[in-house]
Image (tube, rainbow, N blue to C red):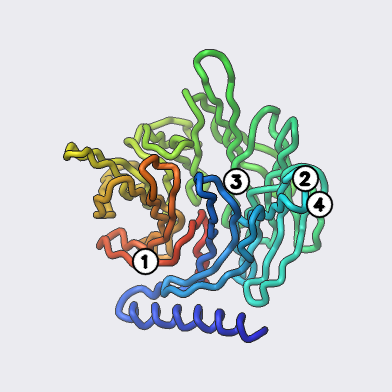
């Protein structure tokens, strides 16, 4: 390891040690957090994205380099926490601007391309059996694909066209994958169909968990046990959320919000709500809320009342008390240029600690 990398790694190690000392009388918040650092043009369009790593104690370790036209995003941890799989796209190298899946060793920063062939290869999810699931997007259809530790790549399941696949989620034992497929049904009513699948990770055999029609695109967040899911507006504004038991397929409205995220024990759901205050001028902001897994006992957990600020849940810690969240702040009157930073929030006390600027995704926080 060169001196620069060693110093960065040491900084992260000391940051984690500091977090351990500070939390000695309670839960130790440690581990590593991988996140995206975005660069924008003056008009708010994306110029490029790189990956970085931090710890709950702070510090920053750049994993990939900021470059115009290069997008490194959607990172997923390996089971041992030493590598990440991620999307890589370079406009300079490919006229098609298609993504491939790469892996990166967080200790050496060595990257390896692991997918080949046609299509836009995106949304990696590293499973407990050291297989990486991802979505192969073709012109006419999508497929759920796998690449194993030996680099063998194959398509596992392709839903009927024109369904588009969301990011897959592994079962705890690695035997199954959960994935949502959705498509616009057309017509004047703009109906949108969602199909929720459990896919056998060995045979590719699909089982339909849920088949539902909505008035617009919905995101399905699977519970950790794969037996329940919560639908929310695919666009970043609050609307009715629907909780579904896949055994009965019975839907239940659980209030308004978006971007729900289940705790690792499946007992709580964090989500983003909205608040309008009839001040002069009117103040609008989007705080974080937490409710029980059955949709009861919803309560607000962030106190900030800053206009046009929004908090969204990224990932829970193993203690199911601390939440990694993204905070969005608009920097222009037209609300087109956004800046993102991360926070760790104790959902029981409201205590908050700041992390570097950037955006974390589901599964960003690795803890041994």
Marks 2/4: CA distance? Answer: 16 Å
Which residue is at 61% across, 82% downward? 4
- From the viewer's perspective, is the residue at label 3 or at label 2 nearer? 2
Residue 209 is situated, as x and y percent measured from the top left of the image, at 56, 35
Q: Pick whichever of labels 4 and 3 is earlier in the sequence.
A: 4
State which quadrant residue 79 falls in: bottom right
Mark 3 lies on residue: 167
Mark 4 lies on residue: 116
- From the viewer's perspective, is the residue at label 1 or at label 2 nearer? 2
Q: Pick whichever of labels 2 and 4 is earlier in the sequence.
A: 2
Q: Pick whichever of labels 1 and 3 is earlier in the sequence.
A: 3
Mark 1 lies on residue: 354
Q: Nearer the viewer, residue 171 or 30?
A: 30
Q: Where 110 falls versus 20 (above or below)?
A: above
Secondary element under disc 2, as helix, strand or loop, is loop
Residue 308 seen from this side = yes
Q: Which of 346 and 249 is in front in this view?
A: 346
Q: Pick whichever of labels 3 and 2 is earlier in the sequence.
A: 2
Q: Where 40 falls versus 317 (above or below)?
A: above
Mark 1: few/some/many CA within 10 Å (<14, 14-19, 20+): some
Q: Where 18 falls versus 273 (above or below)?
A: below
Image quadrant holding the N terminus, namely: bottom right
Q: How many labels does the image show?
A: 4
């Amino acid at each position: 390891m060169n001196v620069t990398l060693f110093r960065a790694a040491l900084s992260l190690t000391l940051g984690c040690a500091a977090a351990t000392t500070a939390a000695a009388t309670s839960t130790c918040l440690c581990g590593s957090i991988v996140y995206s650092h975005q660069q924008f043009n003056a008009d708010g369009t994306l110029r490029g994205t790189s990956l970085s790593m931090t710890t709950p104690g702070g510090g920053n370790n750049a994993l990939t380099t900021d470059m115009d036209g290069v997008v490194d995003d959607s990172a997923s941890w390996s089971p041992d926490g030493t590598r990440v799989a991620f999307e890589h796209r370079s406009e300079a190298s490919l006229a098609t601007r298609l993504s491939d899946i790469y892996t990166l060793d967080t200790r050496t920063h060595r990257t390896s391309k692991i997918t080949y062939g046609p299509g836009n290869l995106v949304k990696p999810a590293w499973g407990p059996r050291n297989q990486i699931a991802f979505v192969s997007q073709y012109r006419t259809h999508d497929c759920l694909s796998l690449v194993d530790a030996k680099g063998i790549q194959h398509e596992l399941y392709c839903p009927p066209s024109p369904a588009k696949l969301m990011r897959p989620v592994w079962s705890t034992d690695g035997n199954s994958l959960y994935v949502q497929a959705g498509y616009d049904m057309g017509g004047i009513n703009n109906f949108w169909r969602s199909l929720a699948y459990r896919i056998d990770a060995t045979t590719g055999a699909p089982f339909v968990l849920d088949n539902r029609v909505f008035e617009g695109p919905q995101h399905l967040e699977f519970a950790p046990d794969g037996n329940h899911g919560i639908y929310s507006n695919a666009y970043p504004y609050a609307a009715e959320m629907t909780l579904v038991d896949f055994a009965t397929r019975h839907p239940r409205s659980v209030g308004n919000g978006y971007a729900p995220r289940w705790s690792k024990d499946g007992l709580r759901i964090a989500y983003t709500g909205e608040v309008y205050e009839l001040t002069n001028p009117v103040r609008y902001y989007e705080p974080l809320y937490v409710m029980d897994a059955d949709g009861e006992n919803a309560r607000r957990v962030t106190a900030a009342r800053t206009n046009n600020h929004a908090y969204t849940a990224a990932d829970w810690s193993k203690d199911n008390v601390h939440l990694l969240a993204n905070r969005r702040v608009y920097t222009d009157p037209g609300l087109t240029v956004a800046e993102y930073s991360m926070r760790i929030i104790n959902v029981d006390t409201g205590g908050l600690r700041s992390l570097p600027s950037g955006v974390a995704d589901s599964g960003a926080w690795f803890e041994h």
